[in-house]
């Protein structure tokens, strides 16, 4: 009880209001102070986003002296962070406690708050805090580096990456992601990566295979039940720059001078990995020997092949044609055979023969009659003097045929034995005889040349005993 003293006028007024007489002093009881609301439990918790906190927040309402206040209404409400509550409206029990049904945190990681309000209570409203933690990995999504193009054997421009998130799309850090080549060959670096704070993992590098076409790469996040696992990235390997011009057919051939080779030269144009390059112009040009080409600028096919139309050789001997594409080139060679021009030998050749070893000599004559239409030739030989030790060679006629590059004669001459002779397109003569009637001689051989105006031979006579004898024949065609 408090003793309150009032001035007289004030006392008179109070007495009047109370309907009683004033005795000059009185005792008044003031209203009790408001109750106090305080946090009992459930503050400063941690839970996975979208999940309920482990301890449902509770408050206690009591008097200033600590006595429980029952029947007091308390309202719980989400203040920040999203989420939801059940049993938001509660009444304190006999112990002065009011507890929410449940508090489900929001879907975003970070701070969440909840208020508890008891109208008129000191400390109202109270604020509970909780931290929402990212959930487990639920989905893996391609982040960047999908559907690219790069030259075969080179790295793609954008390194493939994935993002790992929980069920609410929040980035999940620390998840191991394994990258691996799935198709197309090629290689990777940094194949095992961990997601960062942003949930992203990026392969070190991806080099495409050596073949043109589709390549693929997979990214697998470690964990069970992860949607989108593995993520597959696609890339297309495109043809590289022309790097190789290889000869395919038509090299090292032989044909008559002035005639076309049997197989037209062809080349294949590829990149450094052997992938065919189509629609490129290849130029064929004459190198050695002269000659000519037809269809000198073919375009490579889908298989990278370009074929010259035809190649006609020039002068007798080595000929070449060069195929080029940009800075690349390939050289084809061919041997041009001289053509036997038999009609030029028509006529009568006269002169002498000399046996140098025995210092003997005599005269000789060769009459050549060519039938160009039939490709045959008759050679009439008449030699005087001690030839092969048996005197002169009477006039004889040898028949033979000739072709584009050579002529051949064979048969038996009574005073010379069995002979063979050939003339090639350059006018080179090779002749020999065996079964010579002179028993002291085992064989004779001759070689030399014939032109449109001269016939020259060097001969060797081989004896059964002793060294051979050598000599020469020199004839000149008359007018």
Image (spheres, rainbow, N blue to C red):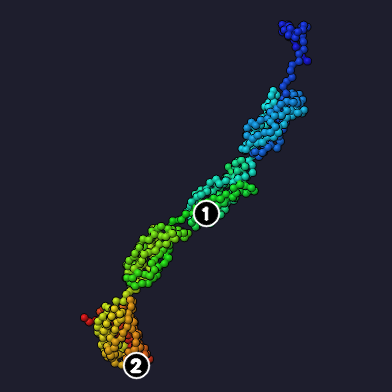
Image quarter where the N terminus lies is top right
User: In the image, what residue occupies the spot 73% across and 30% down?
Assistant: 98
Secondary structure of the residue carrying numbered label 2: loop
Q: Which of marks 1 and 2 is in front?
A: 1
Left or right placement of residue 256 versus residue 127 in this view: left
Cα separation between marks 1 and 2: 87 Å
Return the residue at label 2.
438
User: In the rendered image, is residue 327 in sight?
Assistant: no
Left or right placement of residue 393 versus residue 201 in this view: left
In the depicted structure, whether residue 60 falls above or below residue 237: above
**Residue 107, image quadrant:** top right
Q: Residue 329 location in percent, x, y?
A: 39, 62
Q: Which of marks 1 and 2 is nearer the N terminus?
A: 1
Instruction: Return the residue nearer the eye: 181 or 300.
Output: 300
Q: Residue 410 location in percent, x, y?
A: 34, 85
User: In the rendered image, is residue 238 in sight?
Assistant: yes
Q: Residue 397 location in percent, x, y?
A: 29, 87
């Amino acid at each position: 009880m408090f003793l309150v003293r009032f001035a007289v006028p004030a006392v008179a007024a109070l007495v009047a209001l109370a309907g009683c007489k004033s005795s000059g002093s009185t005792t008044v009881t003031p209203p009790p102070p408001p109750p106090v609301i305080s946090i009992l439990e459930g503050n400063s918790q941690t839970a996975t986003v979208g999940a309920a906190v482990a301890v449902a927040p509770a408050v206690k309402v009591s008097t200033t002296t600590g006595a429980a206040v029952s029947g007091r209404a308390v309202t719980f409400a989400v203040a920040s962070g999203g989420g939801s509550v059940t049993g938001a409206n509660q009444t304190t029990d006999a112990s002065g406690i009011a507890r929410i049904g449940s508090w489900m945190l929001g879907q975003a990681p970070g701070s969440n708050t909840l208020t508890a309000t008891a109208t008129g209570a000191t400390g109202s409203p109270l604020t509970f805090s909780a931290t929402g933690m990212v959930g487990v990995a639920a989905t893996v999504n391609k982040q960047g580096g999908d559907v690219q193009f790069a030259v075969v054997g080179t790295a793609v421009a954008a390194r493939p990456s994935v993002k790992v998130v929980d069920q609410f799309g929040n980035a999940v850090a620390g998840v191991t992601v394994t990258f691996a080549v799935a198709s197309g060959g090629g290689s990777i670096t940094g194949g095992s990566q961990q997601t960062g704070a942003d949930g992203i993992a990026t392969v070190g590098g991806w080099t495409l295979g050596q073949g043109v076409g589709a390549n693929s790469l997979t990214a697998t996040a470690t964990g069970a039940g992860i949607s989108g696992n593995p993520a597959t990235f696609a890339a297309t390997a495109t043809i590289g720059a022309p790097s190789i011009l290889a000869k395919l057919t038509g090299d090292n051939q032989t044909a008559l001078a002035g005639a076309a080779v049997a197989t037209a030269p062809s080349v294949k144009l590829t990149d450094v990995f052997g992938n065919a390059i189509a629609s490129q112009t290849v130029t064929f040009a004459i190198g050695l020997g002269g000659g000519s080409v037809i269809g000198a600028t073919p375009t490579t096919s889908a298989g990278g092949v370009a074929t010259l139309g035809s190649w006609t050789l020039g002068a007798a001997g080595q000929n070449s044609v060069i195929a080029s594409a940009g800075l690349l080139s390939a050289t084809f060679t061919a041997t041009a055979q001289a053509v036997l021009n038999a009609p030029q030998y028509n006529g009568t050749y006269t002169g002498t023969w000399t046996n140098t070893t025995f210092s003997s000599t005599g005269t000789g004559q060769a009459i050549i009659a060519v039938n160009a239409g039939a490709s045959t030739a008759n050679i009439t030989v008449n030699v005087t003097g001690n030839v092969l030790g048996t005197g002169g060679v009477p006039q004889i006629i040898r028949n033979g045929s000739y072709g584009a590059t050579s002529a051949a004669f064979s048969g038996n001459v009574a005073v010379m034995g069995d002979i063979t002779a050939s003339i090639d397109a350059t006018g080179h003569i090779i002749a020999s005889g065996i079964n010579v009637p002179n028993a002291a001689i085992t064989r004779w051989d001759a070689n030399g040349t014939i032109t449109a105006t001269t016939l020259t031979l060097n001969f060797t006579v081989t004896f059964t005993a002793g060294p051979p004898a050598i000599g020469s024949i020199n004839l000149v065609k008359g007018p």
